[in-house]
Image (cartoon, helix red, strand yellow):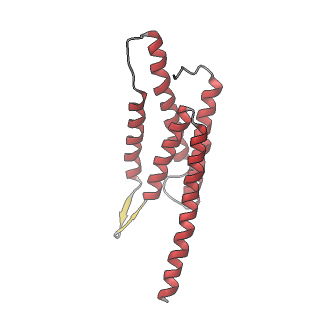
Amino acid sequence: MLEPTTDIGNVLLRLAASILLAAVYGWEREYRDKPAGLKTHMLLALGSAALTIIAVQFPLTQHQEQPGIEFDPFRLIQGILTGIGFLGAGTIIQSNGDVEGLTTAATLWMVTAIGVACGLGYLTIAAMTTGLGLAVLIAVKSFERRLFSDQDSDES
């Protein structure tokens, strides 16, 4: 059963973890000169973590004060993830038949999920997700370079 967190150190740890883990994605996007960078990713994760902590804490504290009232914190979490989908859509642009920004939109959604995990106190899951996501970004980019450079040399 979830209990209200009164330990400010625990709350600070969750918020700080969301910032640091999101910084990994933000740095990668900055390094590749993409539109949403370090600050954007960090702020999204921090906001997601803060809203998640509030979503969990509020009903628990209110239930103690007003036992008959039921709350569902996961509805707020669902709203957070849906809202970020719209923000991510804003990073996607179509130009000359090419679609750009899909990966950045995906990283925005990922850091939101990481922020939610941090807010819920699942720091290990958040860290593993961060590592695996970064591995995907790096490994697939390397694979794409090799694949497309091989095609370029075949066409020459």
Residue 28 pos. (x, y %): 58, 56
Q: Residue sitting at 42 percent across and 58 percent down?
A: 102
- Reply above or below: 35 against 20: below
- Reply above or below: 46 against 55: below
Residue 65 pos. (x, y %): 46, 10
Residue 148 vs residue 94, the one in the foreground: 148
Residue 89 pos. (x, y %): 37, 52
Question: Residue reaching furthest bottom?
Answer: 156
Number of labels in the image equals: 0
> Is 139 situated left or right of 88 in this image?
right
Question: Residue reaching furthest front?
Answer: 1
Q: Residue sitting at 57 percent across and 32 percent down?
A: 121
- Reply above or below: 119 against 94: above
Residue 74 vs residue 45, the one in the foreground: 74
Q: Quadrant of residue 68?
A: top left
Residue 11 pos. (x, y %): 60, 28
Q: Residue sitting at 38 percent across and 15 percent down?
A: 69
Question: Residue reaching furthest right?
Answer: 9
> Is 65 situated left or right of 22 in this image?
left
Question: Residue reaching furthest left?
Answer: 97
Q: Residue sitting at 52 percent across and 70 percent down?
A: 144
